[in-house]
Amino acid sequence: MPYGISVKSCNTTALEIENLWDEASIFELSGSMHELGYPPHLTLAVLTQWPVDISTIMTAVFSAQEKLSITFDAVKYFDNDLMVLWAKPRPNQAVTCLHERLHDHFDPHTCHEHYRVGRWVPHCSLATKVPKSAKSAAIEWAKSRRLAFTVEFDLADFVQFPPVMIHEELRLR
């Protein structure tokens, strides 16, 4: 099972993303994000192994981290075997710096290539299991959605998945 480090929204601002989960779920056999049982989040790293010093890393990176206010402006997609729909955040220097600061603590080869510095696309997943049969409709929906809302990300955690098991969690200041 892989491991992930994310920032997540556990407050009422997350409702905007959760509403998009409901909309996007019509393209799936069942709503993948609700089934995950995990709040709206931005994954900063996906690791192949448990870092020995994860508690130290989490404290070093997140203990002084302010809550992140992230504005979303579009729905995009990753065209995989099962397409992924996601909310696109506006460029945010604080998020970019946090991602880079976190990755200073890892050998890049222990991290999934799509989450490495220089390759990472900040995103908040809306649906992760859109089959090919729904691809055209999902793309049209994504292109038609214009977003303009801000979500406050107030917690950071280290998890194992699937299913999501939280091993470390820190509240952002």
Image (cartoon, rainbow, N blue to C red):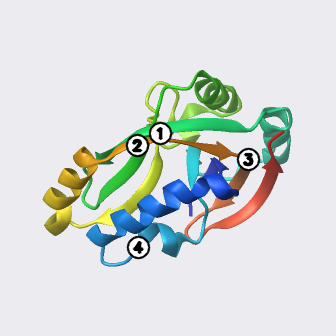
Mark 1 Cα-neighbour bin, 10 Å: few <14, some 14–19, many ≥20: many
Q: Which residue is mark 2?
A: 147
For the residues labelled 2 and 4, the Cα–Cα distance comes to 21 Å
Q: Residue at x 62, y 26 (%)?
A: 100
Q: Which residue is mark 1?
A: 72
Q: Residue at x 40, y 43 (%)?
A: 147
For the residues labelled 3 and 4, the Cα–Cα distance comes to 24 Å
For the residues labelled 3 and 2, the Cα–Cα distance comes to 21 Å
Q: Residue at x 20, y 52 (%)?
A: 139
Quick one: label 2 or label 1, which is nearer the N terminus?
A: 1
Q: Which residue is mark 4?
A: 31
Helix, strand or loop at mark 1:
strand
For the residues labelled 2 and 1, the Cα–Cα distance comes to 6 Å
| Closer to us: 156 or 89 | 89
Q: Which residue is mark 3?
A: 154
Looking at the image, the residue that sits furthest to the bottom is: 30
Occupied quadrant, residue 60: top right
The disc label shown at residue 134, or none: none
Relative image position of residue 117 (x, y in whole percent): 52, 27
| Closer to us: 87 or 160 | 87
Quick one: label 4 or label 1, which is nearer the N terminus?
A: 4
As shown in the figure, which amino acid type bears the numbered disc 3? Answer: Asp
Helix, strand or loop at mark 2:
strand
Q: Nearer the viewer, mark 1 or mark 3?
A: 1
For the residues labelled 4 and 1, the Cα–Cα distance comes to 21 Å
